[in-house]
Amino acid sequence: MELLSKLFKYEDLRKKLFFTFFILLVYKIGTHIPISGINVLELEKLFQNGGVLGFFNLFSGGGLSRFSLFALGILPYINASIIMQLSMIIWPSLKEIAEEGESGRKQLAQYTRYLTVFIALIQSILMSFGFKSLILPDVSFLSFLFYSSIFLIAGAMLVMWFGELISEYGIGNGASLLIFVGIVAQMPRYFMDTYVLVVGGLSIFRVLIMILIILFMVVAIIYVQEAQRKIPVQYAKRVVGRKMYSGQNTYIPLKLVQGGVMPIIFTSAVLQFPAMFAHYSHIPWLSSFFTKYYAYDGFLYNFIFCLLIFFFSYFYTAVTFNPQELSDNIKKHGGFITGIRPGKPTVDFLEGVVTKLTLVGAIFLSMVALAPVIASNITQVTSFKGLGGTALLIIVGVALDLLRQIEAYIVSKKYEGFVQ
């Protein structure tokens, strides 16, 4: 309640919140604007069984099952961001551009937008071919392919723009919030599907067990997302002008899950692309292989899922955390980590700690991703299978990140008032 009262105390914060809410509302309306030419009733039947296609629909906020303007959602932009970050490792020239400051970041952002258009083009063509059998009888396929591709690409660009607007003028990470809203919007359907199962004879006790498992997972996610390893740092006495400042004891907070929800979002985005290609390509042997071995609750899908979680956990940590730079900053200000010599020993120590933390964090993310699939198979409550641990991680992670940004904004405003 105290936080809610503070939300309306600062005018700038109110404007940011209302702007964010407005953009999210426009996005949600866009997921209900269908592109003509498709038999929507037949299309929705494809998504009733969930699976990988249902999971892709979850990330588009239900827009794919309606073949809406925003059917591609934010995934083309996320895929483009992943490719750009990987490219910076392969091509040092891109990394040099990123280190040029604001102008370099703007240039890389422009490259990411161009790549988003290209990915959206490929996905829109595949999607149009995939839904060829659902086209209405009086609609020409060539004309449908032309205008649906244009609308889908335009929709993907709008969604990307919405995400950038939220990040710049609103509050929170725009791309993450768009995924968050899309997932939350699907929650009523999961409860309705559960009600149908209970009416059909499923034991309420099994449903209660499933709900308790989900609640336990939410608590565990919050606990791990907030967990930190505090590295003690000692600062020596300093003389500034005629004043002597005494030594200070502080600590460096290293999060257990350095990347937050980004590794799980990256993993989900990468996994959807081959599944979508197989489904829309209509190549018999490829579709058969993915249907049989790449099922959402199958071994191969979840094994690859866990491997990618580990990869992106370490990858995102390597991109966002620089132990050399942190060590130099500590040494520059006359500090040292307790019991560790400055210089290379500090760098090695920080790298070792972060590597261990990332390993534990990746194991936790993998367990959370697998838990709902295992729980649904045991309890036979299949209505929440589409939600999964990935969606729970995103919901909780994005909500916590949003709260942290709001609290940081409030603290900064208090500090400004105190200084003035």
Image: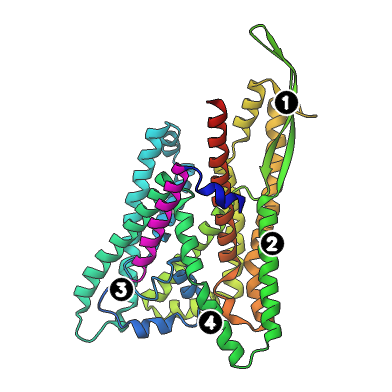
Disc 1 crowd, CA 10 A, few/some/many (<14, 14-19, 20+): many
Residue sitting nearer the eye, 293 or 377: 377
Residue located beneath label 1 in the image: 336
Q: Say if 417 sits above or below 374 in the image.
A: above
Of discs 4 and 3, which sits in the foreground? 4
Residue in the image at 37% along x and 74% along y = 281
Q: Say if 63 sits above or below 357 in the image.
A: below
Q: Earlier in the sequence, mark 4 or mark 1?
A: 4
Give how far apart the Cα atoms at labels 1 and 2 are: 35 Å
* Residue 12 is inside the magenta segment: yes
Disc 4 crowd, CA 10 A, few/some/many (<14, 14-19, 20+): few
In the image, residue 91 lies at what x, y percent?
44, 41
Callout 3: helix, strand or loop?
loop
Residue lying furthest bottom: 201
Q: Earlier in the sequence, mark 3 or mark 2?
A: 3
Residue in the image at 57% along x and 32% along y = 415
Q: Say if 103 sits above or below 299 in the image.
A: above
Residue in the image at 44% along x and 76% along y = 286
Callout 1: helix, strand or loop?
strand
Residue located beneath label 2 in the image: 219
Q: Earlier in the sequence, mark 4 or mark 2?
A: 4
